[in-house]
Image: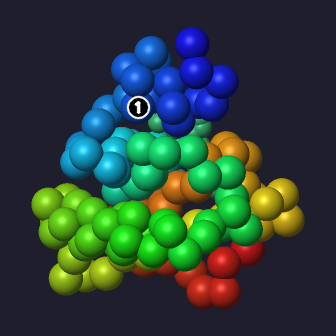
Amino acid sequence: MSEDLFLKIIDREIPADIVYETDTVLAFRDIAPQAPVHILIIPKIKIRTVNDVDAEHTELLGELILAAKRIAKAQGVADQGYRLVMNCNEAAGQTVWHIHLHLLGGRALQWPPG
Ligand code: 5GP
């Protein structure tokens, strides 16, 4: 069994509502959605936090954004607008230690965030 929750989802050891997958990226619905559309987009390799991102990950991070664009369109929120968020470490609210891009849409979102 993998140690990291999101690696378990990648390995299908625990279930998730998967909406998008490539060789390098997986996206699935958040278990506790904060908006009508709340999807987590993750790399298939483990990177603990944004602080652990390196130059070798540049293309992979671009793939996360490309996935977000495609998913937003498929979920019908591209034109109205959506938010992409990546929390880094505790003060920002990170709780899962495998980087993930939140895609939030389907309602008006407040700014600044809490
Ligand atoms: P963070 O707080 O680290 O930025 O975001 C972690 C997200 O993962 C949270 O929004 C949380 O609801 C979601 N999450 C935690 N455990 C699971 C799970 O087992 N399945 C899914 N689909 N989402 C999860």
Residue at image point 42% right, 44% down: 44
Q: Is residue 74 left or right of residue 55?
A: left
Q: How many marks?
A: 1
Is residue 61 shown to the viewer in this render?
Answer: yes
Using residue 37 as the reference point, say whether residue 110 is left or right of it: right
In this view of the protein, which residue sits in the foreground, 109 or 88? 88
Q: Position of residue 109 (x, y in %)?
A: 49, 77
Occupied quadrant, residue 111? bottom right
Residue matched to label 1 = 10
Left-right relation of 15 to 91: left
Occupied quadrant, residue 52 = bottom right
- Looking at the image, residue 78 sits to the left or right of residue 59; the answer is left
Across and down, in percent, residue 3 comes to 65, 24
Please state the quadrant of the image where ligand 1 appears. top right
* Kind of residue at disc 1: Ile
Circle 1 Cα neighbour tier, 10 Å, few/some/many (<14 / 14–19 / ≥20): many
Q: For the residue labelled by badge 1, is the local secondary structure a helix, a strand or a loop? A: helix
Ligand 1 within 8 angstroms of badge 1 C-beta = no
Quadrant location of the N terminus in the rendered image = top right
Residue 94 vs 62, above or below: the answer is above
Q: Position of residue 66 (x, y in %)?
A: 27, 71
Residue furthest out toward the bottom: 112
Instruction: Name above or below for residue 98 compared with residue 109.
Output: above
Question: Residue sitting at 27 percent across and 63 percent down?
Answer: 67
Figure colour scheme: rainbow
Q: In this rendering, is residue 44 above or below 34?
A: above
The outermost residue toward the front is 56
Q: Residue furthest right?
A: 91
Name the residue rendered at 25%, 81% in the picture: 80
The answer to whether residue 84 is visible is no
> Which quadrant is home to the C terminus?
bottom right
**Which of 84/2 is in front?**
2
